[in-house]
Each structure stands twice: as structure tokens, then as C-alpha cells.
Image (cartoon, rainbow, N blue to C red):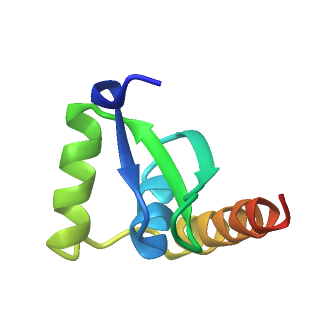
């Protein structure tokens, strides 16, 4: 995996926000050194703008956020089992 094409995200709240905004997770793996999951998104201008929107507390559709939270939680739970 070329590091420059992907952005590694470890913060669950940010992951949920990004998924709710429509960004796609491209890879997930366990961190071999720590008890956490490493989630990768394509490193694009859209990702950068979404991270800024998260930082600036942009409003987001509540239903989209809750649905994304459930999907991310399931994905992270499955990752812990591996």
C-alpha cells in the first residue's frame, strides 16, 4: 500500500463523520503495536474538506450520522475478532 495515496484515520468519531459525509473506507487493519484499528480513506481534496468540516463542527444529517455510526461500529467489532 502506498502511504501517499491513503490517509490513515484512528479517531472513531472522525471515521463516522467521514462515512456519513459519503467517503468510503478503502482499507482497515489492526495496528500491530497498539490495540486499535487503522482505517484508510483515499487522500483527496474531498477528504481534506470533510476533515475541516468536522473540525469546524459542521452540521450533518442526524440519520446519516447514526446509520454511519452503526456501520463503523460493526466494522471495528469485526476487526477486533480477527
Residue at 47% across / 44% down in the picture? 40
Residue toward you, 22 or 39: 39
**Quadrant where the C terminus is found in the figure:** bottom right
Foreground of the two, 32 or 56: 32
Q: Position of residue 22 (x, y in %)?
A: 48, 45
Q: Eyeballing the image, is 58 above or below 26? A: below
Q: Is residue 78 above or below residue 45?
A: below
Identity of the residue drawn at 42% across and 56% down? 18
Image quadrant where residue 7 sits: top left
Q: Nearer the viewer, residue 4 or 18?
A: 4
Toward which corner of the image does residue 2 lie, by quadrant?
A: top left
In this view, the residue farthest toward the right is: 81
The image shows residue 11 at horizontal and vertical percentages of 41, 71
Task: Name the residue at 50% across, 76% down.
Answer: 62
Q: Total number of numbered labels? A: 0
Of the pair 2 and 74, the residue shown nearer to us: 2
Judge from the rendering whether residue 14 lies leftward or rightward of residue 22; answer left or right.
left
Residue found farthest to the front = 33
Residue 49 appears at what percent x and percent y?
A: 19, 47
Instruction: Classify residue 46 by image quadrant.
Output: top left
Q: Residue at horizontal 52%, vertical 71%?
A: 34
Where residue 45 appears, as percent x and y from the top left, is 20, 34
Amino acid at each position: 500500500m502506498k502511504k501517499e495515496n491513503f490517509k490513515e484515520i484512528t479517531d472513531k468519531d472522525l471515521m463516522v463523520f467521514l462515512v456519513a459525509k459519503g467517503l468510503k473506507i478503502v482499507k482497515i487493519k489492526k495496528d500491530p503495536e497498539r490495540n486499535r484499528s487503522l482505517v484508510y480513506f483515499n487522500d483527496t481534496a474531498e477528504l481534506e474538506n470533510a476533515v475541516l468540516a468536522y473540525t469546524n463542527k459542521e452540521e450533518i444529517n442526524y440519520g446519516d450520522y447514526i446509520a454511519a455510526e452503526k456501520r463503523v461500529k460493526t466494522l471495528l467489532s469485526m476487526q477486533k475478532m480477527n
